[in-house]
Image (cartoon, rainbow, N blue to C red):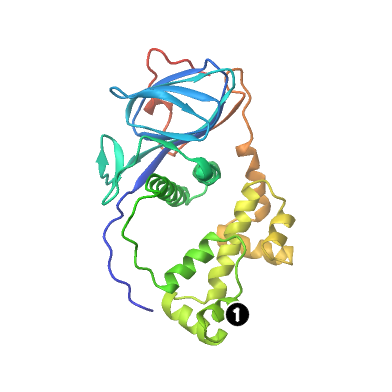
């Protein structure tokens, strides 16, 4: 097994408290005291907000607003319903500036971002965070932390777009894994070997030496991860299996159960957790506290109006 250099603690280690997706009627008001900071992604409508001393404004569709810990008030304004994600979290080892995350060399994350072409990717990341709690997995904390770090990376990349930064030195193996982990259409071992200019057997040996496992095993796990994402997105089991290259449903089910601890049909059955909960003030609401967190951690302020 190759030896890897020791690394220090992560720069940012988020702990998820609450994730929700709301559709709020115009005039809806919420006012709470939050124990952590939050990301508020606006998908439609407009939100007037006040957070902390001297911070207020109106956020519209396609923007993300960062709320710092403490009193927060927001209202759905305008004539259209407000559609938003809310991701509340704490940072265990925070480099913060005024309650906002900071990365060395980049400074603090802006408290208001216009996402433009990055909106769909950020929306998908917020949904992944919500699902990390909704599926009630024993590994929810690992999944939520991973999804939170990915979201933070997206937002910092968006905030630093156009700035000249010192590039990271990455070898071709790191770039290879990045490609495998981010593309939905996985290359074959033969294709990867040709890109590296070596034979397939040599590529397999080099990959195993570098990462401690053969490339076929690594990409199989990646295909299963993609199939699980398809199922959580509402795909049928057969559709998800065939899309990710599994020709035999029984074989796919065995592999899926071995990786995730339950059959794919059960994952697809979790879809009820993502369906809207109907109500007069919240025509669509998906709202999940992290284990150990409940509504008492978010005490209402005087102007709050419950759904």
Q: Residue at x 54, y 18 (%)?
A: 78
Query: In the rendering, at what x and y percent does residue 211 appear?
Result: 44, 74
Quadrant of the rendered image containing residue 239: bottom right
Residue 40 visible to the viewer: no
Query: In the rendering, at what x and y percent does residue 163 appear?
Result: 35, 50
Name the residue that disc number 1 marks: 190
Rendered-image quadrant of the N terminus = bottom left
27 sits to left or right of 303 = right
241 sits to left or right of 211 = right
Q: Secondary structure at mark 1?
A: helix
**Along the line of sight, the residue nearer the viewer: 137 or 283:** 283
Q: Is residue 273 above or below residue 189?
A: above
**In the rendered picture of this protein, how many numbered marks are placed on residues?**
1
Query: In the rendering, at what x and y percent does residue 208 appear?
Result: 47, 79
137 sits to left or right of 14 = right
Query: In the rendering, at what x and y percent does residue 260 appear?
Result: 56, 58
Q: Residue at x 61, y 74 (%)?
A: 188
Q: Residue at x 42, y 77 (%)?
A: 210
């Amino acid at each position: 097994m190759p030896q890897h250099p020791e690394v220090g603690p992560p720069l940012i280690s988020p702990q998820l408290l609450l994730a929700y997706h709301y559709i709020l009627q115009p005039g809806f008001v919420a006012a709470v005291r939050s124990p952590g900071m939050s990301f508020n992604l606006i998908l439609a409508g407009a939100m007037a907000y006040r957070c902390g001393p001297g911070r207020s404004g109106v956020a519209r569709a396609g923007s993300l607003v960062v709320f710092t810990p403490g009193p927060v008030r927001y209202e759905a304004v305008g004539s259209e319903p407000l559609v938003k994600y809310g991701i509340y979290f704490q940072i265990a080892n925070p480099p913060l500036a005024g309650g906002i995350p900071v990365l060395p060399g980049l400074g603090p994350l802006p408290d208001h971002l216009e996402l433009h072409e990055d909106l769909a990717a950020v929306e998908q990341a917020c949904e992944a965070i919500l699902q990390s709690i909704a599926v009630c997995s024993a590994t929810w904390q690992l999944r939520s932390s991973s999804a939170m770090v990915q979201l933070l990376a997206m937002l910092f990349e968006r905030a630093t777009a156009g700035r000249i930064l010192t590039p990271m030195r990455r070898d071709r193996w790191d770039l290879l894994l990045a490609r495998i982990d981010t593309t939905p259409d996985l290359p074959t071992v033969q294709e990867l070997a040709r890109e590296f200019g070596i034979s397939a057997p040599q590529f397999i040996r080099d990959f195993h030496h570098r990462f401690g496992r053969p490339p076929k095993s690594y990409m199989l796990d990646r295909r299963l991860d993609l199939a699980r994402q398809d199922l959580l997105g509402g795909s049928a089991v057969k559709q998800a299996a065939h899309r990710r290259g599994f020709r035999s449903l029984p074989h796919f089910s065995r592999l899926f159960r071995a990786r995730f601890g339950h059959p794919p049909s059960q994952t697809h059955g979790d879809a009820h957790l993502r369906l809207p909960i109907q109500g007069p003030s919240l025509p669509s609401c998906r709202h999940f506290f992290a284990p150990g967190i409940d509504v008492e951690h978010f005490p209402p302020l005087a102007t709050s109006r419950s759904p």
